[in-house]
Structures are given as structure tokens and as C-alpha cells.
Image (cartoon, helix red, strand yellow):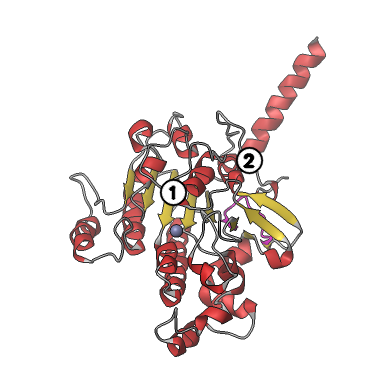
Amino acid sequence: MKKIYTLILLLIVAQLVAAQELKTENIFIITLDGFRWQELFTGADSLLITNKQYVSDPLDLKRRFWEETAEARRKTLMPFFWREIAGSGQLYGNRYRNNKVDCSNYMWFSYPGYSEILCGFADDDRINSNNKFDNPNVTLLEYLNRMPAYKGKVAAFCSWDVFPYIINRQRSGIPVNAGFEIAPGTSLTDREKFLNELQPQIPSPWGGVRLDGFTHHYAMEYIKKNKPKVLYISYGETDDFAHDGKYDAYLKSAHQTDKFIENLWTYVQATPQYKDKTTLIITTDHGRGTEPLDTWRSHGTKVDGAGQIWFAVIGPDTPALGEVKEDNQYYQNQVAKTAAAFLGIAYTNEKPVGEVVKSMIRTK
Ligand SMILES: [Zn+2]
């Protein structure tokens, strides 16, 4: 009997030591709506970049983003991803290397994708439209916000106005700033006041999605002011420009989002509360088509390849593997449990959640 107690004690101690070895205290989940793995891993698409149907000034776009090799093109399009994340983090999902990441839901559009990322499981019976209905499932954000250590330290900034429902703002009590909402409250920074003034003055091309510059800067101001431990940022432009058939705007937006994430990472690494204690996990809600050519604009069950996605991760507990090139299959439902694992938390939900992506987290 005594032996068993000793064993249990040893196991508990081992777990505590393992948890203490992790440096991550803050987890930021970031998504780029419908940004294809094809552009992430091979840069601008040769069949689209000079296509006058999708590009208003092909010469200008080629000058900005065209290079002869895929390696050079992707670096030109997403310099932060291919310098900093490839240098000290990890990238998953290059299917030319047989490294695959897929949605486990079969909807292949936004609400089901975001719900799968944030909850850790697909729920095709209930999460099967983009309508504004409160998510019956609990997200990782809500799960953490219920824990004393994270209560009030969770927030979300999103370009799409359906996010207050996906995160179930009403039930979860998590501050979600989404769509065309402005920064609320009386203790606003000068920049928040300016953003509140500017946002209604700059017409968005879309009814339910704001331009990502607003989402990004609202998020940055909130981080500086409130120092959240768990943050979700959802950029939306890439998907909407693609639906509009504007490949030039799609590429420019992806390039700008890369700069936004660099801006966030630079702030993180220059701020004592975050420096070397913060992990970023970056992914997308769904893929898009490639064949026939026009399906790059679209996604959903009927579009071949629209369930194909990717992951990127950078932080103090992630081995610098760069682009992961081994044959393997990962799923969108693994993000939530992996994000929690960085915090030393074994996340569970009412339904089984996807497993931790073990290679993302250093083990001694
Ligand atoms: Zn879409």
C-alpha cells in the first residue's frame, strides 16, 4: 500500500515538474480567414497573379510578389512567417511534403471552422451554418475564463460580426470586439478614441466584416492596457477579398496580416510580462479550391480541397523545427488542447477533443 502512495506522489511531482518546465504563461490564438496553405507555402500562385480576371494591375502585383522559386515567393509574401516563425517556430501543412492539416468538420466554412478551432471538436449536427446563433458548445476561451487564474484575462478581437455568437459572449462573459463594434468604456486611450472616430468613416467593402487594420489596432490597444493572458485575434480580409475574386487584394491583405502579426510579436518580445512567456498559435478556419481555377475564390463541402488548412506556432516552449516536412496528418480539432497544454492545462470538453500536437511542445 505504501508503495502505491509513493508512486502516486512521484507521479504528481513529475507532473508538477513537467508543468513548471513550460515557460508559456500567455497564449495568443490568431486566425487568417480562408488563407490557403498554397500561398503560405509557395507564395503567389503563377496561374492567378497575372490573370486579368482577378488582378487589376498584373505588372504591379508581379513586381511586389513574384519570384522564380516557391521558397523566394513565400518569403516575399509572408516575411515574418518565413523569417521569424520558420527560424524559431514551426509551420505545418505543406502538402507537397505530405505534411497535412485538415478540418475534421465537413462544412468547410467559417463558423464550423472557428468553433472547431476554439472548442477542439467538430459538431456538424449543430454547427452547420454561418448564422448568428449562440454556440451551444463551450470554447477553450470560455473554459479558461472560468478558471480563477484566467478569469477576466481572456479577450477576443475579430473582424467578422458573427464572433460574439461563436464565442457565446452572453454566456461566457468574455469581452469580444467584433464586426463594427467600437472600443467601449470611459478610460479609452487616445488611439482607441481615434479608432472609434475613424472606423465609421472608412467604408468597409463588406456588410459584416470590418477591415483588419481596425481589429488589429483595437487588439493592440487592449493588450497594452489590460495585459490579457489569453487572446484570440481573427483577421478576416483574406476570405472576403477572395470571394470578391480580387487576387491582388487577397495577396496584399495576407502580406499586411503578416506585418500585423510581426507587430504583435515585436510588442510581446519587448514587454516584460510577455517576453519569452507567450506562445502564438496561428491557423485558418478552412481552405479554398484550386481546381478548377475559379474555385480559389470559394470554399464549402462542394469545393475540392476546402478542408485543407495549416498551423504555425512560435513561443518559448516550441522547438525550432521550422517547416515540418515529415509525412503526417493533423486536424483542426487539435488546436484547443495544444493551446491549453502550453499553459500546463489538460483541456477537456463535453465531447472528446483533438489530441495535443506533441511536436509543438518541447519535452526535456
Ligand atoms: Zn468565406
Of badges 2 and 1, the one in the foreground is 2
Find out whether the residues at labels 2 and 1 contact each other: C-beta distance under 8 Å: no
Q: Is residue 184 magenta?
A: no
Query: Does the image show residue 82?
Result: no
- On the rendered image, what quadrant is the N terminus found in? top right
**Residue at point 40% right, 64% down?**
240
Determine crowd level at label 1: few under 14, some 14-19, many 20+ residues with C-alpha closer than 10 A. Answer: many
Q: Amino acid at mark 2?
A: Gly
- Magenta segment boundaries in residue numbering: 309-322
Where's residue 288, x and y in %? 54, 63
Q: Is residue 169 above or below residue 99?
A: above
Where's residue 221, x and y in %? 31, 54
**Residue at point 59% right, 37% down?**
344
Residue placed farthest to the bottom in the image?
59
The quarter of the image that holds ligand 1 is bottom left
As rendered, which of 350 and 122 lies closer to the eye? 122
Q: Which mark is residue 232?
A: 1
Where's residue 317, x and y in %? 62, 50
In terms of secondary structure, where does tag 2 sit?
loop
Displayed quadrant of residue 84? bottom right
Q: CA distance from mark 2 to mark 1?
A: 19 Å
Q: Is residue 340 above or below residue 276?
A: above
Q: Is residue 319 magenta?
A: yes
Counting residues from the start of the chain, the first of labels 2 and 1 encountered is 1
- On the rendered image, what quadrant is the C terminus found in? top right
Question: Is residue 263 rendered to the left or right of residue 218?
Answer: right
Q: Which mark is residue 261?
A: none
| Residue identified by numbered label 2 | 354
As rendered, which of 311 and 259 lies closer to the eye? 311
